[in-house]
Image: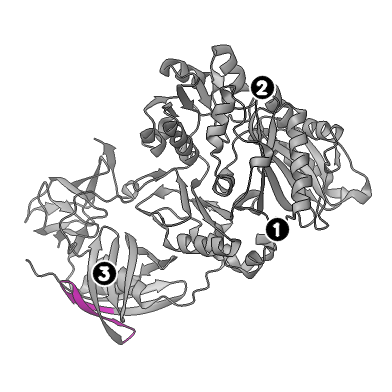
Amino acid sequence: VIRKVLVANRGEIAVRIFHTLREMGIRTVAAYTDPDARALHIKVADESHLIASYLDADAIVGAALTAGADAIHPGYGFLSESPSLPAACEKAGIVFIGPSTETIRVMGDKLESKTKMQAAGVPVVPVWSAKPPSDAYPVLIKAVGGGGGKGMRLVDKSADLDSAMKAAAREAAAAFGDNRVFIEKYIPKPRHIEFQILGDAHGNVVHVFERECSIQRRHQKIIEETPSTAMTPHLRAAMGAAAVTAAGTVGYRGAGTVEFILDEAGRFYFLEMNTRLQVEHPVTEMTTGLDLVREQIRIAEGEHLSVRQEDLRQTGHALECRIYAEVPEEKFRPATGPVAVYRPPSGPGIRLDSGIEEGSLIGIHFDPILAKLIAWAPTREAAIQRMQRALGEFVILGVQNNIEFLRRVISTEAFAAGALDTQFLDRHPDVFRSPFTQVPPAVLLAASLALDGAKSIQAPMTTLQFKDVWSAGEWRNT
Amino acid sequence: VEKHVIGRELHWESSIGNHAVHIEAANDHGTISIDGEASPFQILDRRPHGMHLSFGGKHYEIYVLREGRVCTVWFEGAMYRLVQSEREQAAHTAGSSGASEVRAPMAGKVLRVEVRVDSNVAEHETLVILESMKMETSIQATRAGHITELRVKPGDVVDMGDLLAVIE
C-alpha cells in the first residue's frame, strides 16, 4: 500500500496529481528547483524538497528517501519516459508509478517499438533507417529518442534528404541526448488519434477510448477532444483492439497512450506509445468518470484494474484547450512575466487544471504551459459553446497567452464541422488575426481611467497587487 | 470623503486606430469624449487592475495593466494594447510648467522616503522605497531638480500610477 508519494514534476500536472493523492488519503511531497521556490505546486503539497534538477533521477530518488516517500509519480515530460528514474527507484526500493524500465526503454525507441508492433500485427507507417525509395517522397525525418516535433523534418525530394537528416540529428542530440534519426512515410492531411490504455500487473489491458489531438502547432497539441469526429463504432473497435494488442505485446503495466495517425481513407497506423500520463488525459476522465491517476496508483499497488472493457462507457463530449504563455501571432514565441491578473472561469461542465495563481512568475526555465481548460457537455456543439464561453471569461494579464487565439480556432466553421487534421492551423491563417478593427470606446475609457491612477472607490486595498517589479528599477529580497 | 477630481486630454495609439480622448470625472461619475463625441460614464467598482463601468447604457467588467505608457486591456475576452502617444506626454509636461511627476510604477507599501520637500535631487537619486511581492523597489528621480511636492509617507499603500513626488 502506498502512503506517501513524491511527484517528480511541476506546474499543473503536479497540482493535478496531488489532488488525487489527497483524495486517496496519501501524503504528498513536492520536488522543486530554485526558479520554482514560490511555485503553486509546492503550496499544494504537504512538504517540499529542493532538488538540483527535474532531470536528475538520483536527486529525485534522494529527496523521496529523505521524505520517507514510498513511491514516485513522474507526471509527464522530464523523466517520465526515461528508464533512469524507474531504475533508480528500483535500486532504492521505491515504487515507480509507471511501467517497467524495459517497457519504457522499448517504447522510447521510436524505431524498435515500430518493429515490435509490426511483428504483433499492429499496422505501422513504413519506415526506413537510410535512403528511402524515390517513390516514397515526401517523407518525414524523426528522432529515435523522443517526440514532440523535436528533430522532425519534412523532406519533399531525395536531394534534400542529407542536409535535413543532419539538421534533424543535431536537433535530436540537443533535445534527447541521442542523435539517431529515422525516415517515415509522410501521410498527407493526417489526423492524430490516440487511445488511452490501462494495464495491470496481472495481464489485464483495457482501452479507455480515443482522443483526437489533430490541432497542433509546431507538432505539439493545443486542442484535444473526445470522442473524435472521425470515429465510427467499427473504426473505434478496430483501433481500440490494436491499442490493446500494442500494450499487451509489451506486458504494459499502468496508464499509457497508443498514438495512431489516421489517413483520409480511414486507414490507421501505429505511431508511438507514450508510457506515462498524457497531458490531455482530462478529456477521457470527463467522459468516462474514471480518475486515471487513481488507476495508476492502484495498479502500482498491484491491484487489479477497477474496470473491465465491457463496463466502460463514454458519456457526452469533452474538449481541452492548453493555455500557453506564448504569442501565436508571432510564431508562438514563448512569453514571460508576472501573472498580474488571474481570473479563471468556472461554471457547469468546466474543469481547470492550473499550475499558476495570481502573482506567479512565468520564467524562461520551463515549458510555457500555464493551465488546461476542459469543457464537458452532452454534445460536441454544446461543449464548443461552453469552451467559447469559458475562454471568453478567462482573464490572464501580465504574461501574454494564447487564450484569445484558442477561442478563434474553436470558433471557425471548419472546427465546428469537425474537419480536423494536423495542418489545420496552416490552412486557416485567419485564426492568427484579431477580427476587431476598432478600439471599443469602453477600452479607451478603461485605459484612460487606469492612467489617471485614481484611488479605489471601495475600501482601501488589503492585499498588494503584483506588477512587473523587475522592470521598475533596483530590487532585492527582503 | 475627499473629492477626487480628474480632467485630462489624452492620445491613444494602437494597431487598429488612434484616438483623442478627453476625460473629466468627479469621484465615480464622469464624461468621456472620444474624438469629439461625449458620453457619460460611471465607475461602479474599482479594484487593482480591474474596474466595473457603466457606459453607453451597458455594464462592463474590464481589466487593465499599465506599464509606463502602455496599457494592456482585457475586454470581453479580447486583448487590446494601447500606447499613450509622445505628443500627449510632451503637451502634458509643458502644461505643468516644466514639472516632472514621479508616479508609482506598481502597487506597494511605502517603506522609506529618502528625500524632503524643498530639497534638491540629482537624476536617478532614490526618492522612495516601495515594497511589493516581498521585494524592495527604489523609485528614482526622473530628472535633477527641486522637490516641490511629496505625496507619501512611510506606511502608505499606493496604487500603480499614484503620484509620489513632483520635481521642478
Q: Nearer the viewer, mark 2 or mark 1?
A: 2
Disc 2 with disc 3 on a shared chain? yes
* Residue A405 visible to an observer of this rendering: no
* Local crowd size for mark 2, using a 10 Å CA cut-off: few (<14), some (14–19), many (≥20): some
Q: Magenta stretch containing residue B35, yes or no?
A: yes
Q: Chain of mark 3?
A: A
The amino acid type of the residue labelled 2 equals Thr
Does the magenta portion include A367? no
Q: Is residue B32 above or below residue A86?
A: below
Give the residues drawn in magenta, as a range. Answer: B22-36
Which label sits on residue A212? none
* Residue at x-position 42% and y-position 32%: A22
Q: Nearer the viewer, residue B10 or A453?
A: A453
Image side of residue B20 versus residue A117, left or right: left
Q: Which of the two labelled residues, at mark 2 and mark 1, occupies the earlier sequence position? A: 2
Q: CA distance from mark 2 to mark 1?
A: 35 Å
Dot 1 lies on which element? loop
Read off the residue under disc 2. A101
- Foreground pick, B41 / A266: A266
Crowding at label 1, few (<14), some or many (≥20) Cα neighbours within 10 Å?
some
Residue A139 at x, y = what percent?
Answer: 83, 48
Q: Amino acid at mark 3?
A: Leu
| Dot 2: chain letter | A
Q: Position of residue A242 (x, y in %)?
A: 78, 40
> In which image quadrant can residue A40 be found?
top left
- Residue ID for mark 3: A449
Q: Which mark is residue A423?
A: 1
Query: Circle 2 sits in a helix, a strand or a loop, which is it?
Result: helix
Q: Reply above or below: B37 against A134.
A: below
